[in-house]
Structure formats: C-alpha cells, structure tokens
Image: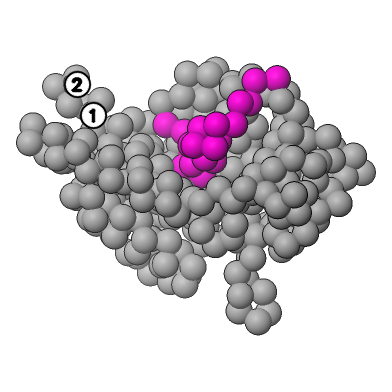
Amino acid sequence: MTAQIIDGKALAEELRQGFKARVEALTAKGHKPGLVVILVGADPASEVYVRNKVNGCLAIGMHSEKITYEASVDQATVLAKIAELNADPNIHGILVQLPLPKHFDEEAVLEAIAADKDVDGFHAENVGALAQGNPRFIPCTPYGVMKMFEKGNVDLTGKEAVVIGRSNIVGKPMALLLINAGATVTVCNSRTKDLKFHTSRADILVAAVGKPKFVTGDMVKPGAVVIDVGINRLPDGKLCGDVDYASCLETAGQITPVPGGVGPMTITMLLANTIEAAERKAAAA
C-alpha cells in the first residue's frame, strides 16, 4: 500500500482563489483587509517567512506591509508601534515574527497585540477561547492541518490522535482542535517513554517535534493519516520534515510531503484569519 499524498500547495491555492472574492467585497465596502508584519533582526529564515506572508496578502488584493527593526532595538519601541497599529482602523491583523531577540519578553509583546487583531492566535484571550471550543482566531499551522483533514474527508470523531510536540504554536493548539473535533488525543514529545507504543495505535499522527526524519515507518499504524509539520534543513541543504517520508509512505493511508504539505497552508490560514478579522469589523460597523 502506498499512501495518498495530501497536497498542501494545491489546497492552499484553491483556498486563496476563494479568498479573492471576499477581499473584493470588503474593499468595495471600504474595509480592505490589512495585515502588518513586524520583523526584529535579520534572521534569514524569518525574512523568507515574512516576505511570503506579505506577498501572499498582496496577491489576493489585501493591504500588507512589513516593519523592520534592528535586532538591538529596545522593546518599548516595538510596543509603541504595536499600540499605534492597534488604534489604526485600516489594520485588521498584526503579527510579530518569532523568535524575538533574547532581550525581549516574547509573552509581553504578544499580549500587547489587541486580541481582535491577533491573527496568529497567540494572545492569552484567544488561546482561552480556543480551549473553550469557541475560537476567535485559530493558530495558523493547526488551522491549516484541520483544513487538510477536511479536504481529505478525514472523520476525526472517536479516532485515536497522537500529537508529537507541545509548543504553544503547534502542539498545544493542535491537540485542542482535535479534542474539539471529537478525537481521543495523546500529546507526546521527543522524550516520551516508549513513543512507538503511542504512535503505533494512532489513527491520526501529527509530528511537530523539530527533529529530522524522527518518525519512521515502523512507528506508524497501517492506514494512519500522517501530518508532518516539521521543516528541517539537512547538511546537504535539502529540506525534510519530522517524518521519514520514504518509509512512512508505504505504511500510512494519507501523508503530507515536505516541502509542499503543511507549509503553504500556514500562510494561507494567516490570510484567512486576517480576512475574518476584517469581516467582523465590517459587520460591526
């Protein structure tokens, strides 16, 4: 058996085409969706992510801008800019690219973003709403994974789901979304004792552990849906995920590739959250 490949790139493009009409309708009413991305420092990977986010917005007719600071900037300067953007009626989404330099209090910066403009879904108020099963904004990567389940007609009700990874960005919100969808969820990490015991009984396996080719085919239940959130660069410069794709391809029922799987969906759902923020504001106007 060879797994069905879940093509995140194709799904992302399909969704973005649908977003264009929503953006046009909002723009016609004077509510053109606007996203500002703040980048502190010159981390090459972060610069690529930010460029892709801004370009993704512009491609579907949204307003987007990047604000860049030197890595040495003081936190107060960034917080003042966030306060200014919070008050700007033309900006619907504010995103601070992580990680921040070590002298920043990351939590304080994320909490400074108005909860109704927190399109990354990291504000404590939005995390709480997600935990209660009534999310305002869903963190973009887990949101993208849920859309992939929807596209693949994956019924999550009553399924055994295992998430490897416990980050606030992916692991924890992914577990909450699966719980809210009716799955029975186990959250593991790289130090979990007898990890294979857990993964081999999972109908749904989400790997977000940040270790290249960490999940091998012998850890996967035959026919399982395997979602690879990882993106790692090997010594030869090639990209790979947290899943050993070649060995898992023969065991899984459905699987996401790296690249071309979850990655394109993350930015697509950022666009979705920003459009939803603009639609809420337009409805309240």
Q: In this rendering, is residue 136 above or below 174?
A: above
Q: Is residue 135 left or right of residue 35?
A: right
Please state which of residues 258 and 68 is positioned toward the viewer in this rendering: 258
Find disc 1 in the rendering and name its residue: 279
Q: Quadrant of residue 195?
A: top right
Q: Residue sitting at 28 percent across and 45 percent down?
A: 17
Q: Is residue 226 visible?
A: no
Q: Residue sitting at 59 percent across and 57 percent down?
A: 257
Find disc 2 in the rendering and name its residue: 283
Please state which of residues 136 and 249 is positioned toward the viewer in this rendering: 249
State the SS at label 2. helix
| Residue 213 at x, y percent in the picture | 74, 61
Q: Is residue 188 left or right of residue 35?
A: right
**Residue 224 covered by magenta stretch:** no
Q: Residue sitting at 40 percent across and 42 percent down?
A: 269
Q: In this rendering, is residue 41 above or below 28?
A: below
State the SS at label 1. helix
- Quadrant in the picture for the C terminus: top left
**Residue 138 covered by magenta stretch:** yes
Q: Is residue 51 visible?
A: yes
Q: Residues within 10 Å of mark 2 (few under 14, many from 20)?
A: few
Boundaries of the magenta span: 137-158
| Residue 33 at x, y percent in the picture | 21, 41
